[in-house]
Amino acid sequence: MTKEISNQMIKAARSLCKSVDQMQFPAPVAWTYNPLDYGRTAHEDYLKRYASNRKRYIFLGMNPGPFGMVQTGVPFGEISFVRDWLGISEIKEQPENTHPKRPIQGFDCTRSEVSGKRLWGLFQEKFGTARAFSKEHFVANYCPLAFLGETGRNLTPDKLPLQLRKELYRHCADHFKRILTILQPEKVIGIGRFAFQRASETTDPMGIETMEILHPSPASPAANKDWKGKATKKLILADVW
């Protein structure tokens, strides 16, 4: 059963990768990164290790960050936590085209993904080991793609043209529904408003409870004032912890 679940998750990820790879993204998008493709080795290692059993809780983020999943293939993939806590350390391929300001350096990248450092740091403090965390918890992203403008500025999925956004969200929702069916959680925790809203559109018809915690982004003034304490309090009040 363990291998069967992770194999289903890998199959779902490959299907999503193929679907979004067929899309074309015009301005304001100048560059698109798909870590499910070039980061497949690391992402599938993540799924084999940590998506091999049913979960009670799924934490859902928006899309890959430039110094996190874009580099490591793991959601909120702050390099030190992916390498040293999750035990994943290999990116085998490079995307065909990269912005000169946003190269794929993999685990050699010296920049920090602060959101990931805060999120995985909270889990490490609470559970000690990644194995203990993964007994009931899993971290995923709604959208697998990262978007950059001409200058290399990060563009979030909600900045895409409406019709293109609808098509992308359809692929993402189909994949999210698949992982809910596979992992059978009792609750989804949206990390930030975007993830909460997108998750709710899928979870509500399925009868799965959804809640929101503050996104740990350093761009958020609220997150820079005891994000860990705020997130922990909300998870305790919701009987997640």
Image (cartoon, rainbow, N blue to C red):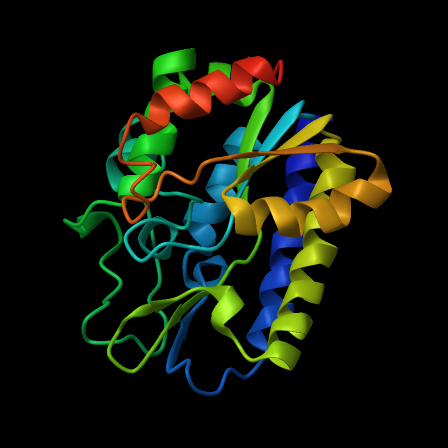
Residue 180 % position (x, y): 73, 39
Question: Relative to 28, is 17 above or below?
Answer: above
Quadrant of the frame with the N terminus: top right
Identify the residue shown where x is 36% and y is 54%: 65
44 sits left or right of 228 in the view: right
In depth, the one of 199 and 175 nearer the eye is 199
Question: Relative to 12, is 225 above or below?
Answer: above
Identify the residue shown where x is 54% and y is 42%: 140
In depth, the one of 27 and 100 nearer the eye is 27
Q: Residue furthest bottom?
A: 26
Quadrant of the frame with the C terminus: top right
Identify the residue shown where x is 76% and y is 42%: 203
Quarter occupied by residue 83: top left
Residue 166 % position (x, y): 67, 72
Residue 195 % position (x, y): 56, 48
Q: How many marks?
A: 0
Identify the residue shown where x is 49% and y is 14%: 132
129 sits left or right of 226 in the view: right
Can you see residue 89?
no
In depth, the one of 93 and 188 nearer the eye is 188
Can you see residue 30?
yes
Residue 84 % position (x, y): 27, 28
